[in-house]
Amino acid sequence: MPPVQVAHLSARDVSLVLAWSTQDLPVILHWGRRITSTDDDLLAFAVAEQKPGIEDFSDIPYRPSILPEHGRGWFGRPGLSAHRAGAGWVPSFRVEAASLDGTRVEQSVLQAEGGSLALSARDDQTEICLDLEIDLTEAGLLRVRAGVRNDATGGALLQLDDLSLALAVPTRATEILDFAGRWAHERQPQRHPVVRGTHTRTSRRGRTGLDATTVMLAGTPGFSSESGEVWMFHVGFSGDHEHALERGDGTLAFRGGELLLPGEVRLAPGEEYVSPWIYGSHGDGWDAASARFHAFLRGVSRSAKRDRPVTLNVWEAIYFDQDPVVLEDLAERAAALGVERFVLDDGWFRGRRDDRAGLGDWSPDPVAWPEGLRPLADRVRELGMEFGLWVEPEMINEDSDLARAHPEWILRARQELPARYRFQQVLDLTQPAAFAHILDTLDALIEDIGVICLKWDHNRDLVAAGHPATGAPAVHAQTLALYRLIDELRARHPDLEIESCASGGGRVDLGILERADRIHPSDSHDPVDRTGILRGTGLLVPPEMMGSHVASAVSSTTGRTSDLHFRCAVAFLGHFGIEWDIRELTDAERQELASWIARYRALRPLIQTGRSVGGEDDPSAPSVRGVVAQDRGEALFTVVTPQATPDTLARVRFPGLDPDRRYRLTASVPETLGPPWQIPEWLRAPDLDSAGAAPVLSGGVLSSAGLEFPTFHPERAVVVHLRAEPAA
């Protein structure tokens, strides 16, 4: 057998141990809690399971690599499915070189604090080159991707049908948690045991999908936010993709990658396909695993570099009925409340009176806006606010000047157009002329009006999305074109922020979030539904990147009526804002809403830098979401009463606190939480804004024992603020 090489990468409390040889692609020997070991021990560990006296691949029980190979005796899903006109479909790769952060790895054992391990491999018979990147970030987040290159000098194209990478985890992870959903009800959890075979969640929608799982978790029995070993996975791609967990003979692995349509990737000699990043995070409890994703996003997103401005989005105030006088009035009222960003939503552009026309004609409607948008934008800035604008650049209405001028710019796989959705089609951004038109149009809008934020919507799935000239599949190329479009806009406008909206939470993934500053988690602002949506989405996305708005008392999506305190309390731990016709506010509501805005502005440094934590996973108990300062000196929690429970009281714990420090506790409490005799003393303490006396308890008591909380009334929420007392 060829000599084995071993790499041990560590970061924070995580270790990743890989082994490979010239004949074997890298195998994950350990990924989980940090280990300490000598080089000799690691090498002995790597070779301990070799089978002496057995040499042929077919005789050796195959331990699947990061790219499992059918030709080595793997009978699960192959990592690579490719061929040349039906031949060369069983590659067998030999590793030619390995490097860590650009330095070639020559030694038998490599131990390092994090870093990026790159391995290049080749199969001489099929003339395919493979490049693997295995990256362990400073926060302990694992990500891998692969590049496949056609290394032939001629002959048939290399058709790539599938590239699915594998992140092996121990078989003691016997439970799965993932998410389903639909429009206005995204991130609905489903929990079930791991079974033999493959549990697969796919999206063929051309975007992440309202029903997409976003993350998939595997863990030891009963794992929760704080306990049990958890491995959390994510495919960082905004087009068609797959999350899967594959259980085989003594093996368990997450399988993830882009879903390719028939014939979508065919490589000419010298051409390469690079997969999206596949992410994995280990932790004791899912809060710890989630924190690694949050740290990664805070390191790459602009949202971490400035305070998140309180936002008013006008959609649910006016819908398509745009009037400059009304909008200026809304802007003045918003500024008086303390709003810092004013976003003009759908309906501002040429011919847009409803959703049947106008998409593609990105210039202010001359009827609604005879002087253009600049006067409104200037007035918004005079009032001390930023100006944002809604766009949907990837879409086009058939009833638009652009569609009439360029019908060849509409994606289609057949001669006829695909079925409409919301009266719209998809603009082919892979065509250079169409791409340049949209880029230059958006560039001019941003420059001429002074736009600081684009709310970037995507309101339909991609159906029969082919290149118009050939009918060939276009989802892969369309997704990459979107990335180039946003990247170019941000290069031209360094201060521009992007909000990813796709019928609400239909495009939430790290492919878009590396380019966006926040997401719109859902079109539903109903606080009952938002409680779960924010919690599920928050496993991947930190709170300051989730738009979290207070809407009207009667939800436009569910018809449920909620009081203002409940709506504000649920929205508080996020990127706080308003989506409501604030002209209808009573004096009391105006005062209460302004008070919540002031609280948010005072506490947002904690919200946008703190570590997210959660409580028990029990629908009959209060729901808890929190952020705890990195030094554990301060924390905020939102506690929401359950919809139905046989209990009148429940004990609520506040995780993440320092057990050896004492915390002063204040709370913002609704008018009623139940009969007065059921309200414990700590909930009668001064409000968040008060400087009066408040109870002081140890972090150990608050995080381990907790405090009683009334559950008599549903649809009630309390925001709890904890501040550590100075050391004696």
Image (cartoon, rainbow, N blue to C red):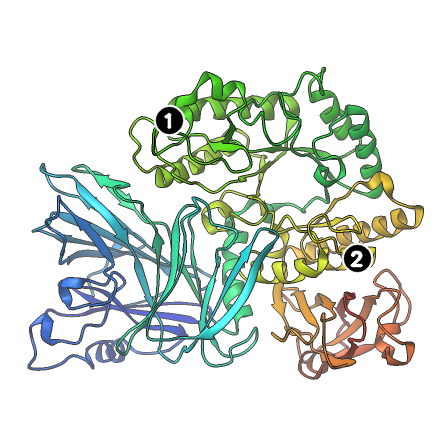
Quarter assignment of residue 278? bottom left
Residue at the spot of label 2: 562
Residue at the spot of label 1: 431
Which residue shows up at 50% across the image and 25% down it? 398
Q: Is residue 11 left or right of residue 187?
A: left
Where residue 609 sits: x, y (%)?
63, 57
Can you say which quadrant of the picture contains the C terminus? bottom right
Where residue 6 sits: x, y (%)?
24, 69
Question: Could you tell me the amino acid type at mark 2?
Answer: Ser
Which residue shows up at 17% across the image and 76% down it? 61
Question: Could you tell me the amino acid type at mark 1?
Answer: Gln
Q: Is residue 394 visible?
A: no
Q: Is residue 698 left or right of residue 258?
A: right
Q: Is residue 120 visible?
A: yes
Mark 2 surroundings within 10 Å by alpha-carbon count, few (fewer than 14), some (14 through 19), many (20 or more): some
Q: Nearer the viewer, residue 198 or 436?
A: 198
Q: Nearer the viewer, mark 2 or mark 1?
A: 2
Where residue 93 sits: x, y (%)?
15, 57
Where residue 406 sits: x, y (%)?
43, 19
Q: Nearer the viewer, residue 723 or 290?
A: 290
Q: Secondary structure at mark 2?
A: loop
- Residue 400: assigned label: none
- For marks 2 and 1, the one nearer the N-term is 1
Which residue shows up at 44% across the image and 23% down it? 436
Q: Nearer the viewer, residue 292 or 216?
A: 216
